[in-house]
Image: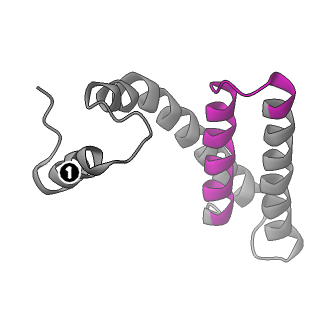
Amino acid sequence: MPSSHSSITIYFATFISLQLFSSSLPYFTRLLLSIIISITALSVVWSRVKLGHHTKSQVIAGAIIGFSFGLIWDIWWWKEWNSRLIKLRLDGKLGWNEITILINFINNGLVIN
């Protein structure tokens, strides 16, 4: 108790869907992808009950935990990490400078000048 499959699946579905709706993709594309992700996640949750591995209350508890952490991580991403990556000038193009910054980050911790 709770179902870790439900927690992890709903966490990723929540975080990815929230990231999609923050993207510049066309609205219909964001909506369609979020629906596909949600259906896939809910099918995993449903399968845990159907296969007899968990009870409904266990998957519901796992889903609530996963949703909560997905929401928290998305908020933390936009408030903390996104601004730090912008300050590091990591624009999505991994050249030698960006790889060096990431290696230094891993070895020494985050230092922003």
Residue at 61% x, 57% y: name it.
8
Residue at 87% x, 27% y: name it.
28
Q: Find residue 103 and report its image quarter.
A: bottom left
Q: Is residue 2 left or right of residue 105?
A: right
Colour style of the rendered protein structure: one colour
Residue at 66% x, 65% y: name it.
5
Residue at the limit of the structure toward the front, as seen here: 95
Of residues 91 and 15, the one nearer the viewer is 91
Tell whether position 82 is magenta: no
Does residue 66 show up?
Answer: yes
Q: How many marks?
A: 1
Amino acid at dot 1: Thr
Quadrant (top left/top right/bottom left/bottom right) for the N terminus: bottom right
- Range shown magenta: 5-29
Tell me if residue 80 comes above or below residue 35 in the rendering: above
Does residue 1 show up?
Answer: no
State the image coordinates of residue 26 (x, y, percent, origin top left).
79, 25
Tell me if residue 86 comes above or below residue 90 in the rendering: above
Quadrant (top left/top right/bottom left/bottom right) for the C terminus: top left
Residue at 15% x, 29% y: name it.
112
Q: Residue at label 1?
A: 100
Q: Is residue 74 left or right of residue 87?
A: right
State the image coordinates of residue 70 (x, y, percent, origin top left).
57, 40
Tell me if residue 109 comes above or below residue 24 in the rendering: below
Disc 1, SS:
helix
Of residues 64 and 76, the one nearer the viewer is 76
State the image coordinates of residue 85 (x, y, percent, origin top left).
33, 32
